Amino acid sequence: VVLAMAAAVTVLGLTGATLNAMVLAGLALAVAVVVDDAVAGTYAVRRCLEGNQRANVSETDDDIVAAATLGTRAPLAHATVVVVMAVLPIVVLKGESGAFLPALAASYAVAVVASMGVGLVLAPALARTIMPGVRVARADAPVVRAARRRYDQAVAHVLLRPGRPYTASAL
């Protein structure tokens, strides 16, 4: 997230944009997209590494990280195009709005594209470096195991006797 925002600020600086309130607002709006991008990529890599461990597949971790990254980046690339196209009409605004909002739209679009670039280039290397030991799954805490047991019992009870929940929901 920090790398994507730093890359966006660097690109904006190279294009001559100043860090005014509208540019900062655009970057703030882009934080949600950037964080989602980072979480989706990291989750996909971790899930694939753990799945490979459980399946005892002979693929190397590098191949798994590459496959997971490419598997998530294709849909995210389409989403990035859609998000950038959604803010394009703001760039051609006229009048008072046209004086302020294009800086917001440009900073937002640059941050989203920078996030895509960081996610495609740096995230796999960081995932490979940070998550090489994703080999042991943690056991649930005793409280979680007890809650899961009670939940399973309650669901089994409702599935065996669905009349009461149906009656309660009808009232």
Image (spheres, grey):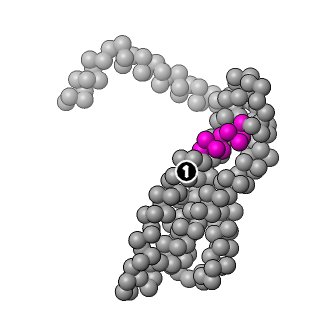
Q: What residue do we see at 63% from left, 47% from top?
A: 41
Q: What residue do we see at 48% from left, 21% from top?
A: 152
Percent of width and height locating residue 56: 74, 22
Identify which amino acid the numbered label 1 is placed on.
Leu
Name the image quarter holding the N terminus.
Answer: bottom right
Percent of width and height locating residue 148: 53, 26
Note whether 146 is above or below 90 in the view shown.
above
**Dot 1, crowdedness within 10 Å: few (<14), some or many (≥20)?**
some
Note whether 64 is above or below 92 in the view shown.
above
Percent of width and height locating residue 163: 26, 17
Numbered range of the magenta stretch: 64-72
The residue closer to the viewer here, 4 or 162, is 4
Q: Which element carries disc 1, helix, strand or loop?
A: helix
Name the image quarter holding the C terminus.
Answer: top left
Q: Quadrant of residue 17?
A: bottom right
Q: Is residue 28 visible?
A: no
Left/right of residue 11 with respect to residue 168 in the rendered view: right
Q: What residue do we see at 58% from left, 58% from top?
A: 34
Q: Quadrant of residue 31?
A: bottom right
The residue closer to the viewer here, 79 or 40, is 79
Q: Quadrant of residue 69?
A: top right
Note whether 8 is above or below 60 in the view shown.
below
The residue closer to the viewer here, 7 or 139, is 7
The residue closer to the viewer here, 29 or 70, is 70
Majority secondary structure of the magenta segment? helix
The residue labelled by disc 1 is 76
Q: How many marks?
A: 1
Q: Is residue 7 visible?
A: yes
Q: Residue furthest top?
A: 160
Q: Residue 132: say if magenta.
A: no
